[in-house]
Amino acid sequence: MTPEQKRVAESITAGPRGGLRGPFPAMLRSPEVAERFQKLGEYLRFNSSIPSALNELAILVTAREWTAQYEWYAHHLLAMKAGLPAAIAEAVAEGRMPDGMDPDQAMVWRFCTELHRTRTVSDASYAAVKERFGERGVIDLIAVSGYYVAVAMTLNVAEVPLPPGVPVPLRPL
């Protein structure tokens, strides 16, 4: 690694992620992108205005839309730890609207699914998120969705493998 790559790698490792994994080894090919990217990701994962389980739901929707196997693997674990019901994650993995969501889960699923599939959201979806989480929440949901699209792209292009022995979690839709 170049001195700049080493500096950025050490910075990422010293942060709340605690390691250099996922998209960051590939992103280090452009240390400035990796550094700026990890700072945005740190905010979106650890300081978002969206509660953790709902934030992870948004990330799982993104991983499913991009069939990002590593992203799904990593964030499915985090979603379960955050309290997202396994049945909701299973339905997202299958590409269908989950049954039994509470109102917040349904709102986040609808907003993020619309955003990915139509490249915008309906007035009703926007208003629901704004009413519940404010304008900051709207932007945080858009940002987490967009950030994890870039993560999915990086993981898919770099062909970041799943850990040994981990089965492929997402089937083609």
Image (cartoon, helix red, strand yellow):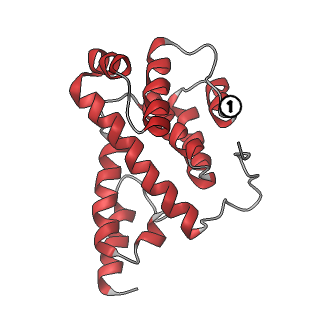
**Residue 83 x %, y %:** 54, 26
Judging from the image, what secondary structure is the residue with disc 1 in? helix
Instruction: State the residue at coordinates (54%, 44%).
Output: 75
How many marks overall? Answer: 1
**Residue 132 x %, y %:** 31, 16
In the rendered image, which quarter contains the C terminus? top right
In the rendered image, which quarter contains the N terminus? bottom left
- Towards the viewer: 126 or 102: 126
| Left or right, residue 14 beside residue 73 | left
**Residue 6 x %, y %:** 35, 79
Hey, which residue is sitting farthest front in the picture?
A: 118
Up the image or down, 94 lies above or below 16; here it is: above
- Towards the viewer: 130 or 116: 116
Up the image or down, 59 lies above or below 67; here it is: above
- Towards the viewer: 143 or 37: 143
Instruction: State the residue at coordinates (43%, 58%).
Output: 18
**Residue 63 x %, y %:** 55, 45
Q: Which residue is mark 1?
A: 90
Hey, which residue is sitting farthest left in the picture?
A: 135
Instruction: State the residue at coordinates (41%, 39%).
Output: 119
